[in-house]
Image (cartoon, rainbow, N blue to C red):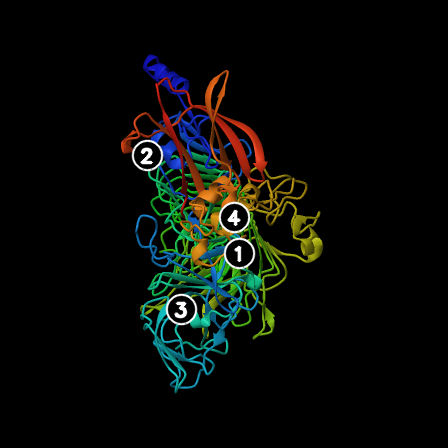
């Protein structure tokens, strides 16, 4: 067997090919070599086989990577940024040719945001970006601070007859809201939804919308529920009449017209405006594919091939969509969707999005997410989060996770591990959630949660601030939770609800876990909700809790309404301790390494697989060992600022900007116009350095035939400061329409004749008696 395998592996290594892609290349020959690179990644993909590597040179590649074939375990197919080049794979296209609509609002026509480039529906997945930042769909009332987690919403009227599951009332609603989208967060504040507006009665100020279903999450979060002194908050979106503030936009689908009020009212032509145009940046369906040092913007990565890896990537604004009329509490998609086995995300910055950051699907086995920073997701405020994992055997380790309207992390797949992560700054707009939040079905899942930090939560004042650290909600079972630190959360450090059972809670440290303003006392460390359901009292039972450490407060508070229960009777709760702050190096600074405190040191029980390797005669209490090295979770790197508008791209000119340098009427600014009457159209003058207002400049620099000792050469100009133009040098011996072929001879750069205009010399290299040569220039349209 070895004699058969070895030659195969050797052959794969010997015949692997390196391909180069460079969208800024001016070569007319494209064979994928370093000298004659492809201009698109798709060209390389079509050629690549197992063991091949695609080196992508600097630029913004507005195309979707779809694989053509699989690599192998020893010869993966790789897509890699060339050297230290900054490469962005964008799911967006540029929008140019803006004109002033009124005031500070600009518009552009013939824009398609409803369909992608394959004419498939984008549905609700569209967004406008200015200078690589997502902008606000036109809304009322306005977003006051630009923070996506502060909703700047209004509370509805609460008088009888002013609300129901199909209408709300507010006296200030403008009368143009006969359609559009309503954002709604009920008073319980656990899950936001969006509904289509169906009408407005200006006599009663009643706004009607698509009726809420009875099923969760709608019943719990409908206007009919009174909580926290109100019935819910709302704002309205997606009407042109509401477009009245900086950063707002609106798309008129019927007329294919896009309206935009740029930040600070600037002319959008002075910046970069992009809109969603592709469903994915990566749509992976083959196996053993790797991506390294690439950046992704504006559309999700769909990873549906086994044994694939994404490393050293920046993934920004890759999920942005409305959840209008969805009945799912997790609607909205994800920036990275993992659907296959043995997918590995390593050392990635994944940031900014309306829904989930990384979603590991329930059938995705052995996923690994490590050494990543995942931040600022779920701005829409439902049950999405920076990371959600339901696949078996997942390993989520050494990540920094923060920034979410609701929960920050979730891992429920059987036999998974969530370890050495720093999780913080969740519940920024919602409540009744946790920094780590799960639900279950009372069937143990064997998920291990260890050596994590969970800290810093403070929900808004329209909520109950019921936001916790580790939340094992409805019927969670089989979680082993040990050596975690939970601090500075407002509603208990640990929650069990309903029939939560067979969970093991060891050696955790809980500190400053909340104060009940209504009852004027500290919350207990552990809180349980055990209501009657289906005619039976639910029961938190058969859980084991040892070696846990907290500040001085009640350990356990369990009940529902007036009913209370002593949970130590049917759970094993022994050898847990409470201390004051002098037991730690500095609790105020989040350093919970113990001092040589008699309540902590050597006072723990030995627990196989949990306290192994302890110092002293017995394990210590809490998450750290006195005298041991202090473990610190999270990645081994810090995100750096990165310009998603690459300097080399920013310095490029476009036809639409170039033509604005000249004083011309609108009709004379078109590509096919000839305002100076010299017989050369504007796009020709743009390509060859001409002036569209001067007939005597001959349209710029004309190509020349030159002879030298080496033969006959063609001298011509290329505009290297633009990315919206392609030069085609072609030859023919007959002038027949189908006889023109690209000139494949080498190109020599002579000099830059003007800023952005370079003179090049190309060998004609023909042995024919006669040859005709032409240069075509074509626009690269978005």
Q: Where is residue 113 shown, x and y percent of the image?
A: 37, 56
Q: Can residue 270 be seen in this view?
A: yes
Q: Is mark 1 on a helix, strand or loop?
A: loop
Up-down relation of residue 556 to residue 295 (above or below): below
- Per the image, the residue denoted by label 3 is 531
Question: Disc 2 or disc 3, which is closer to the eye?
Answer: 2
Task: Look at the numbered disc 4 and give the secondary structure of its residue.
Answer: loop
Depth-wise, is mark 4 or mark 1 nearer the camera? Answer: 4
How many residues crowd around disc 4 within 10 Å: few (fewer than 14), some, or many (20 or more)?
few
Foreground tag (1 vs 3): 1
Does label 1 or label 2 sit earlier along the sequence? 2
Q: Which of marks 4 and 3 is in front?
A: 4
| Marks 4 and 1, the one that precedes in the sequence | 1
- Position of the N terminus, as image quadrant, is top left
Q: Is residue 368 or residue 454 the one in the foreground?
A: 368
| The disc label shown at residue 68, or none | 2
């Amino acid at each position: 067997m070895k004699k058969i395998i070895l030659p195969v592996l050797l052959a794969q290594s010997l015949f692997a090919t390196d391909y180069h892609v460079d969208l800024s290349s001016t070569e007319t020959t494209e064979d994928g070599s370093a000298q004659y690179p492809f201009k698109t990644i798709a060209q390389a993909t079509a050629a690549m086989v197992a063991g091949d590597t695609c080196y992508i040179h600097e630029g913004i590649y507005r195309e979707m990577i779809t694989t053509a074939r699989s690599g192998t375990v020893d010869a993966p197919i790789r897509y890699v940024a060339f050297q230290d080049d900054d490469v962005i794979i964008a799911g967006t296209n540029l929008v140019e040719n803006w004109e002033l609509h009124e005031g500070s609002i600009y518009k552009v026509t013939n824009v398609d945001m409803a369909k992608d480039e394959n004419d498939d529906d984008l549905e609700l997945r569209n967004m406008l970006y200015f200078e690589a930042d997502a902008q606000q769909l036109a809304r009322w009332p306005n977003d006051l601070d630009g923070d996506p987690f502060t909703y700047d919403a209004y509370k509805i009227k609460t008088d009888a007859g002013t609300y129901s599951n199909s209408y709300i009332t507010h006296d200030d609603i403008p009368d143009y809201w006969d359609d559009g989208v309503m954002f709604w967060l009920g008073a319980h504040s656990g899950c936001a939804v969006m509904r289509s507006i169906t009408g407005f009665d200006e006599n009663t100020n009643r706004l009607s919308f698509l009726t809420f279903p009875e099923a969760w999450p709608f019943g719990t979060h409908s206007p009919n529920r009174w909580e926290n002194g109100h019935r819910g908050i709302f704002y309205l979106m997606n009407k042109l009449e509401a477009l009245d503030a900086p950063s707002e936009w609106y798309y008129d689908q019927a007329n294919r017209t896009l309206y935009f009020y740029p930040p600070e009212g600037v002319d959008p032509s002075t910046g970069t405006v992009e809109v969603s145009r592709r469903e994915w940046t990566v749509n992976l369906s083959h196996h053993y594919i790797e991506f390294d040092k690439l950046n992704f913007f504006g559309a999700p990565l769909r990873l549906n091939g086994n044994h694939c890896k994404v490393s050293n990537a920046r993934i920004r604004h890759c999920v942005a969509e409305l959840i209008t009329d969805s009945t799912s509490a997790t609607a909205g998609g994800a920036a990275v969707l993992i659907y296959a086995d043995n997918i590995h995300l390593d050392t990635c910055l994944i940031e900014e999005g309306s829904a989930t950051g990384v979603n590991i699907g329930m059938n995705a086995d052995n996923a690994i997410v490590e050494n990543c920073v995942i931040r600022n997701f779920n701005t829409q405020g439902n049950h999405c989060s920076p990371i959600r994992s339901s696949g078996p055997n997942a390993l989520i380790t050494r990540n920094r996770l923060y920034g979410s309207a609701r929960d920050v992390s979730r891992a429920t797949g059987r036999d998974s591990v969530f370890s050495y992560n720093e999780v913080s700054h969740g519940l920024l707009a919602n409540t009744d959630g946790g920094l780590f939040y799960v639900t279950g079905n009372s069937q143990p899942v064997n998920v291990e949660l260890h050596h994590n930090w969970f800290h810093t939560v403070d929900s808004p004042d329209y909520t109950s601030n019921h936001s916790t650290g580790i939340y094992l909600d409805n019927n969670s079972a089989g979680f082993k939770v040990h050596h975690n630190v939970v601090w500075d959360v407002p509603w208990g450090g640990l929650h069990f609800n309903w029939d939560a059972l067979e969970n093991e809670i060891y050696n955790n440290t809980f500190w400053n876990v909340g104060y009940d303003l209504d009852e004027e006392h500290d919350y207990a460390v552990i809180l349980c909700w055990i209501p009657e359901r289906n005619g039976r009292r639910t029961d938190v039972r058969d859980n084991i809790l040892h070696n846990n450490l907290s500040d001085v407060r009640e350990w356990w508070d369990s009940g529902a309404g007036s009913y209370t229960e002593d949970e130590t009777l049917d759970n094993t709760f022994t050898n847990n301790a409470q201390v004051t702050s002098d037991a730690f190096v500095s609790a105020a600074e989040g350093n919970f390494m113990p001092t040589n405190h008699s309540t902590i040191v050597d006072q723990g029980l030995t627990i196989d697989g949990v306290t192994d390797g302890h110092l002293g005669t017995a394990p210590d209490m809490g998450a750290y060992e006195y005298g041991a090295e202090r473990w610190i979770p999270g990645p081994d790197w810090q995100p750096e600022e990165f310009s998603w508008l690459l300097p080399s791209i920013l310095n490029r000119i476009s036809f639409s900007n170039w033509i604005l340098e000249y004083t011309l009427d609108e009709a004379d600014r078109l590509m096919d116009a000839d305002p100076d009457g010299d017989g050369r159209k504007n796009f020709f003058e743009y390509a060859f350095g001409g002036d569209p207002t001067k007939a005597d400049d001959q349209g710029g620099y004309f190509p020349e035939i030159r002879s030298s000792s080496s033969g006959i050469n063609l001298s011509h100009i290329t505009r290297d400061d633009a990315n919206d133009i392609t030069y085609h040098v072609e030859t023919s011996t007959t002038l027949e329409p189908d006889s023109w072929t690209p000139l494949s001879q080498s190109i020599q750069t002579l000099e830059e004749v003007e800023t952005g205009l370079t003179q090049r010399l190309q060998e004609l290299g023909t042995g024919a008696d006669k040859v005709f040569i032409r240069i075509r220039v074509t626009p690269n349209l978005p």
